Image (cartoon, rainbow, N blue to C red):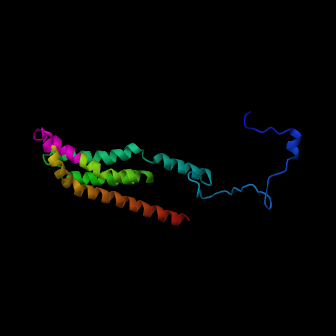
Amino acid sequence: MAGQRMIPKEAADQRRPRTGAHGPVPAPRREPDPAGQGRPGRGGSRTAGRAADRSRSRRPTAAVVVTAALGLPLLGALGGELLGSSPGPGFTVLTVLGFALAAQLARRAGWWWVLSSVAPVVLAWYAGAEYLAHREKYAGGREVAADLARWAAGCFPTMAWALGAALLVIAVRLVRERRAEVHRG
């Protein structure tokens, strides 16, 4: 076998244990961790491990988070256009609720994606709804380019409210997690 050193049986018996500068090196000790601290997903008892497994299985998938972040603003934009007005208060309310819900459902690693997607999603749904409602006006490309600035300015308050709501939800989650750590420790 390449790379392995063969030791004759009699030489293996005479081999001394490894030693450090001040004597034998002790084996690492593993003390039980009754509270499961420091080792995620591994509690001190079987019931704690099962509870951790159940809580992990209850977490929503990324598809649920994406649906909240994309679906509710889309409903608000289409609902506003179907009612005959441009995306208005219904769009704003559903967008804010959608991104707040997405921030609540997302894992810590997904918060960045939720926060960074607010502006493009809001602008895309707002501009898309306006474009679909007034297709005949936008037969050429110049009209779309000219109104794009107006759409960006029109949906900016919705972007700000949605981003603020998502940040507020994340801040509340962080405070609750820290309080839970203090009470456990």
Residue at the location (13% across, 41% down)? 138
Q: Which residues are magenta?
A: 125-143
| Residue 16 colored in magenta in the image | no
Residue 38: x and y in percent read: 58, 57
Q: Name the one closer to the observer, 146 or 69.
A: 146
Q: Name the one closer to the observer, 13 or 158.
A: 13
Q: Is residue 27 above or below residue 127?
A: below
Please give left or right for residue 4 compared with residue 106 in the image. Answer: right
- How many tags in the picture? 0
Residue 79: x and y in percent read: 20, 45
Residue at the location (47% across, 61% down)? 177
Residue 122: x and y in percent read: 26, 50
Say which quadrant the C terminus sits in: bottom right
| Residue 132 colored in magenta in the image | yes
Q: Name the one closer to the observer, 103 or 132.
A: 132
Residue 181: x and y in percent read: 51, 63
Residue 78 can be seen, yes or no: no
Residue 68 can be seen, yes or no: yes
Residue at the location (16% across, 44% down)? 144
Please give left or right for residue 137 compared with residue 75 in the image. Answer: left
What's the magenta bit mostly, secondary-structure-wise? helix
Q: Residue furthest left?
A: 137
Q: Quadrant of residue 131?
A: top left
Please give left or right for residue 33 compared with residue 58 in the image. Answer: right
Q: Residue furthest top?
A: 1
Q: Is residue 93 above or below residue 134?
A: below
Say which quadrant the N terminus sits in: top right
